[in-house]
Amino acid sequence: MTSSTHAQLPATSAPGWIWDILVCPECGAPLRDTAGAGLLACEGTGCGFRSSYAGRVFNLLPRELDRFQRAEDTWRKSHFDALARSVPQMNPHQYEAFKLLNVITYYAFTSQFFFFRDYFAKTYTLRGRGLEIGGASGQLSGFVKLFYPDTEMLATDVAPINVEMGAEMAELLRFGTDYLATVDAERLPFRRESFDFLCSSGMLHHLGNMRRALRQGHTVLKPGGRWYVVNELAIGSLPRKFWNSRLGAKGKWAETTGIRENSYTLGEWRTHFADAGFRIVDEYFNRNSKQKLLSWPRSLYYAAIAKLPLALVKTGIPCEVNFVLQKI
Ligand SMILES: C[S@@+](CC[C@H](N)C(=O)[O-])C[C@H]1O[C@@H](n2cnc3c(N)ncnc32)[C@H](O)[C@@H]1O
Ligand SMILES: [Zn+2]
């Protein structure tokens, strides 16, 4: 993380519950806070993992990341570099406001907010301690804190630039997110049964080893805990051939950004969840075109498939799907 972000965070050591659940992301041994100096050290013999925290923002990334995981950071950095170049007249103070405005007016943010406000918060009751995985700028955690203020939230992502942004967003919007951290979904640095619920939005399909991430999530959940998997895609195996190819939207995106993009059929999702020890307690195909505002073709597409029988959509017509998983 950059020193500029650290400068905005409280310098004192982070108080509270995070210390009860932290373990080394590489060997699982306890992590020691080195005398409140902002440094973390693994107590495992021969491990040598060291890291840092500043205020309530923790770096819990393993030392080795694959190229796709690194691309999540480098691509986002290049995106913000281009944004900065587009407004050379702005001083750094103005640019900070400009950058944050760009984030909160972006489709992904507004559509997710509408989904959360109009569907999620009216449908589910969340209690206790939650972990968001692959949260980018952590807005889902922020929405959770806003609608369920008694919850405790830790927002995480594999890309440091996203977590920095998450800290800025949380401050700007007074989200009250308890902690933020860089974390790899496949190597969660938390003790068993640390969380009452997990949530992730559009994250699972980026993973190289989704099976491992699901098992890890299962381990850190308390018995009966739930994982709210939102904003994923279910797609038939035929349309997927095109969608993920060099000519399809996902294929092109993966090539441009270097980010890993997988797609799954509904049957594959269900199998993955069952194999990891989860029961699906809810499955919601979101076809609300008002929550698909990235582009008018996308909105139009969802308005069109909303008229089809759900059973037909489930046979493989590409559609956003949201799952609620329960640890068996
Ligand atoms: C499509 S974005 C979604 C971001 C945010 N949750 C949202 O819905 O707007 C996918 C996110 O997953 C994160 N991600 C990818 N691989 C990851 C991994 N191995 N562990 C944790 N996060 C990961 C990326 O950095 C990125 O922020
Ligand atoms: Zn270790």
Image (spheres, rainbow, N blue to C red):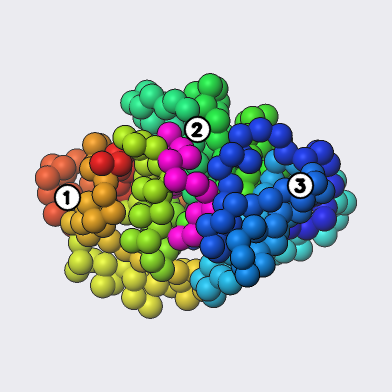
* Residue 249 rendering spot, x and y as whole percentages: 39, 67
Quadrant, the C terminus: top left
Q: Earlier in the sequence, mark 3 or mark 1?
A: 3
* Marks 2 and 1 in Cβ contact (< 8 Å): no
Separation (CA) of disc 3 from disc 2: 21 Å
Q: Nearer the viewer, residue 14 or 264?
A: 14
Graded by Cα atoms within 10 Å as few (under 14), some (14 to 19) or many (20 or more), the crowding at tag 2 reads some
Q: Which residues are magenta?
A: 186-201
**Residue 93 placement, left or right of 164:** right
Q: Earlier in the sequence, mark 3 or mark 2?
A: 3
Does 199 appear in magenta? yes
Q: Amino acid at mark 2?
A: Arg
At 33% from the left edge and 26% from the top edge, which residue is drawn?
123
From the image, tell me which residue sits under label 3: 54
Q: Nearer the viewer, residue 275 or 118?
A: 275
**Residue 230 placement, left or right of 274:** right
At 76% from the left edge and 47% from the top edge, which residue is drawn?
54
Separation (CA) of disc 2 from disc 1: 33 Å
What mark, if any, has residue 314 been given in the picture? 1
From the image, tell me which residue sits under label 2: 129
